[in-house]
Image (spheres, rainbow, N blue to C red):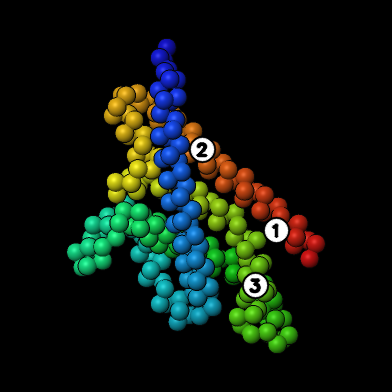
């Protein structure tokens, strides 16, 4: 029978909660950066062969190399050429660039899913390429992109466990510190797993809500 000691979690809850907030802060900040990068790259690659050729190396490199290697390179490698960042900034940049490469493919696929006749109709009405993209194409593409975007956020949220190697006291790092003090791996890592599950489940719930909202608005339009 497992000797489960709930009092360990009760005593450690304030520290676990603080680590959870740091994890959410990193995930949200990196996701905003990733969406911005992914949207720009995705639009560029779907609209111009020349721009696609320019941005393709970025996408392939960050999708084809491990995130941990990218974090090490940004935090430990770049200072050798004079680009010094603190650990939090390195985490934002590393996670943002890595996730941005995947999100750019989501945006590109969503834009390509919009019927080409929509663009032609917009041009026939006298809209510029920018106006047609902002008013016609992007709103329709985003309704397609929302579920995979939320999945990307969930993946990014779980990838924040890797930033513990940069000496950032996020949730996983907090768990390691509690374990070294209590030697109770079962209780500590069970609690961490539950906290990660609750965060990703909340993201999935938001995805379903937004998907339903966009579907209803699309029908009413």
Q: Quadrant of residue 96 in the image?
A: bottom left
- Dot 2: what SS? helix
How crowded is the residue under tag 1: few (<14 C-alpha within 10 Å), some, or many (20+)? some
- Dot 1: what SS? helix
Quadrant location of the N terminus in the rendered image: top left
**Front residue (pair 7, 37):** 7
Please indicate, yes or no, whether residue 60 appears anywhere in the rendered image.
yes
| Residue receiving disc 3 | 137
Quadrant location of the C terminus in the rendered image: bottom right
x, y (%) of residue 25?
46, 50
Instruction: Tell me which residue sits at (62%, 48%) in the image.
Output: 206
How crowded is the residue under tag 3: few (<14 C-alpha within 10 Å), some, or many (20+)? many
Instruction: Tell me which residue sits at (37%, 70%) in the image.
Output: 57
Task: Report the side of 199 relative to 219 (left or right).
Answer: left
x, y (%) of residue 100?
45, 62
Q: CA distance from mark 3 to mark 2?
A: 34 Å
x, y (%) of residue 36?
49, 66
| Residue receiving disc 2 | 197
Point out the residue furthest to the left here. 80
Up/down of 34 relative to 171, above or below:
below
Q: CA distance from mark 3 to mark 1?
A: 14 Å
Q: Residue 214: which disc?
A: 1
């Amino acid at each position: 029978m497992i000797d489960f000691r709930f009092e360990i979690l009760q005593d450690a809850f304030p520290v676990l909660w603080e680590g959870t907030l740091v994890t959410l802060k990193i995930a949200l900040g990196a996701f905003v950066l990733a969406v911005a990068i992914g949207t720009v790259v995705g639009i560029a690659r779907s609209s111009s062969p020349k721009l696609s050729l320019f941005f393709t190396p970025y996408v392939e490199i960050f999708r084809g190399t491990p995130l941990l290697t990218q974090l090490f390179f940004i935090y430990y490698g770049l200072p050798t050429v004079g680009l010094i960042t603190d650990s939090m900034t390195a985490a934002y940049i590393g996670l943002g660039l890595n996730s941005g490469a995947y999100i750019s493919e989501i945006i590109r696929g969503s834009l390509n899913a919009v019927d080409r006749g929509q663009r032609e109709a917009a041009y026939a009405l006298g809209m510029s390429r920018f106006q047609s993209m902002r008013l016609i194409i992007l709103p329709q593409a985003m309704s397609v992109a929302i579920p995979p975007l939320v999945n990307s956020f969930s993946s990014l949220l779980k990838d924040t466990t890797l930033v513990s190697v940069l000496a950032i006291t996020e949730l996983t790092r907090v768990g390691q510190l509690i374990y070294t003090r209590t030697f109770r791996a079962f209780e500590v890592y069970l609690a961490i797993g539950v906290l990660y599950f609750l965060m990703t489940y909340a993201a999935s719930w938001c995805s379903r809500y937004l998907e339903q909202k966009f579907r209803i608005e699309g029908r009413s339009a």
